[in-house]
């Protein structure tokens, strides 16, 4: 196999920043990545595509050819699609851990449970640090170093901090992590510690951490790597490109995504719209966002204000990755939901726990926030929004090992101490597999096997 990096397109990917509110366009961005005239968020656009649109077939064949290359850039499931990303002056400067390249699993058991014939999971928890954040961080960290920054920083519920710390270390930069004290998984926190980040646990929630960070970057030479950074979203959009390639460029009917700070759904939707405009796909999948009932800012915003004004709230959910009450990218998320004809729904803590165990029973683990997708799918099927003959892809955003305490508490029966009805309790009990303590005898193990066979045959 060649180590040569194959060009997929002759069209340059020069970019500029455009405000999602007033439409102001510029070639530079402030450190808070907000529009100077109106204060809204920025996005990255490629004006060159209007006059010299990349050839769709050449892109597809070029991307396929790069899979035969041993070039560091081509081994990345993000940079392999660099024709649709901001151009690098020197490709050797990319900070990469071979992110992307995540599997697309079929879920036959969950398909039967949810009532759809073809159900897939795009598992972003198989990225280097265990979450979808890596696909965006490789791009954002690369451009941070290109801009000459020594320090990068983020506010986080856990996954962002782990990813940022890893890519900063890989790029020989220092990293500062701001996390809410006592409100993130220790498994996630341990990653940022191991990767050498200066980690601060603040006595506030995620939204308070983010507010402080935005003040910090205005006063100190620190580069912000949260998802309001549009370079993050450019990297994260490659999830959708890779997904369509895995489906032989046949779009599914629905893509369902967890909703936290809403950068990921915004990025996936941006990619879908770009791929349609470039002729890579002929139709758009519906993009739907699912939130936990206790962290349902987008759901309430769309239902109570028609998407015109964000309803912030004090979030509460055990799905810590989406425990966000003031999502920064809410306007972007609403835009892609409406542009694709998708939906926004919420699910309960019990529904999340049940869905997580059902996904696990397929031999595919995920963190709680990922499981809102299956729980949400069930609701969308019941509402007849998702039809029985449609193809659905769930985006699983984080690895099972991101929050093992949740899994242990579920299977031991400790996750819900009270306030759960008998039908829900029976449903959860059927999915629980607590560890069994036995005497160290052959008879005890054989009896356990027989009892397990009896339970399986009865169910």
Image (spheres, rainbow, N blue to C red):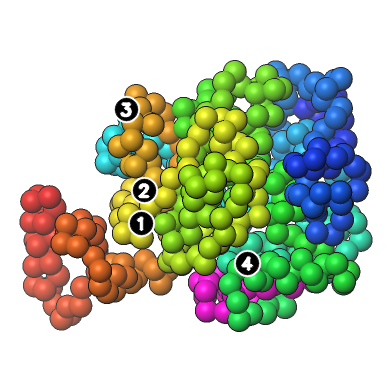
Give the quarter of the image for residue 271: top right
Q: Residues within 10 Å of mark 1 (few under 14, many from 20)?
A: some
The residue segment tinted magenta is 173-195
The residue under label 1 is 348
Residue 189 counted in the magenta span: yes
The image's mark for residue 388 is: 3
The image position of residue 169, as x and y in percent, is 75, 67
Please say if the residues under marks 4 and 2 sit with CB atoms less than 8 Å apart: no
Please say if the residues under marks 1 and 2 sit with CB atoms less than 8 Å apart: yes
The image's mark for residue 9 is: none
Of marks 4 and 3, which one's residue comes earlier in the chain?
Answer: 4
Could you tell me which secondary element the residue under label 1 belongs to?
loop
Residue 128 counted in the magenta span: no
State whether residue 260 is above or below residue 90.
below
The residue under label 4 is 207
C-alpha distance separating marks 1 and 2: 9 Å
Of marks 3 and 2, which one's residue comes earlier in the chain?
Answer: 2
Q: Residues within 10 Å of mark 4 (few under 14, many from 20)?
A: many
């Amino acid at each position: 196999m060649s180590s040569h990096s194959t060009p997929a397109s002759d069209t340059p990917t020069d970019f500029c920043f455009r405000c999602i509110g007033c439409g102001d366009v510029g070639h530079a961005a402030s450190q808070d990545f907000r529009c100077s005239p109106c204060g809204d968020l920025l996005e990255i656009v490629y004006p060159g595509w209007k006059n010299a649109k990349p050839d769709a077939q050449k892109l597809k064949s070029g991307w396929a050819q790069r899979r035969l290359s041993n070039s560091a850039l081509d081994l990345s499931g993000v940079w392999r699609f660099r024709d649709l990303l901001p151009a690098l002056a020197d490709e050797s400067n990319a900070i990469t851990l071979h992110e992307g390249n995540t599997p697309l699993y079929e879920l036959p058991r969950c398909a039967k449970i949810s009532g759809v014939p073809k159900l897939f999971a795009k598992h972003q928890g198989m990225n280097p640090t265990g979450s979808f954040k890596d696909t965006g961080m490789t791009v954002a960290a690369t451009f941070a170093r290109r801009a000459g920054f020594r320090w990068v920083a983020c506010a986080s519920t856990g996954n962002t901090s782990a990813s940022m710390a890893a890519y900063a270390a890989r790029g020989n930069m220092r990293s500062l992590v701001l996390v809410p004290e006592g409100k993130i998984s220790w498994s996630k926190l341990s990653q940022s510690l191991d990767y050498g980040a200066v980690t601060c646990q603040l006595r506030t929630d995620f939204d308070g951490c983010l507010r402080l960070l935005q003040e910090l970057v205005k006063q100190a030479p620190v580069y912000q790597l949260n998802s309001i950074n549009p370079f993050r979203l450019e990297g994260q959009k490659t999830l959708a490109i890779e997904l369509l390639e895995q489906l032989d460029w046949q779009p599914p009917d629905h893509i369902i995504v967890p909703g936290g700070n809403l950068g990921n759904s915004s990025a996936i939707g941006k990619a879908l719209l770009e791929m349609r405009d470039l002729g890579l796909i002929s139709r758009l999948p519906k993009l739907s966002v699912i939130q936990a009932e206790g962290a349902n800012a987008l759901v309430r915003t769309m239902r109570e204000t028609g998407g015109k004004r964000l309803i912030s709230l004090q979030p509460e959910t055990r799905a810590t990755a989406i425990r966000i009450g003031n999502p920064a990218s809410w306007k972007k998320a609403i835009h892609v939901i409406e542009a694709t004809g998708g939906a926004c729904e919420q699910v309960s803590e019990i529904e999340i726990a049940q869905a997580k165990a059902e996904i696990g029973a397929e031999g595919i683990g995920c963190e709680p926030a990922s499981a809102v997708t299956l729980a949400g799918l069930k609701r969308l099927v019941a509402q007849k929004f998702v039809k029985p003959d449609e193809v659905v892809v769930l985006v699983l955003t984080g690895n099972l090992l991101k929050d093992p305490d949740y899994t242990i508490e579920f299977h031991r029966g400790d996750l819900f101490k009270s306030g759960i009805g008998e039908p829900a309790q029976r449903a959860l009990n059927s999915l629980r597999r607590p560890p069994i303590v036995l005497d160290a005898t052959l008879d005890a193990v054989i009896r356990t096997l027989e009892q397990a066979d009896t339970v399986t045959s009865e169910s």
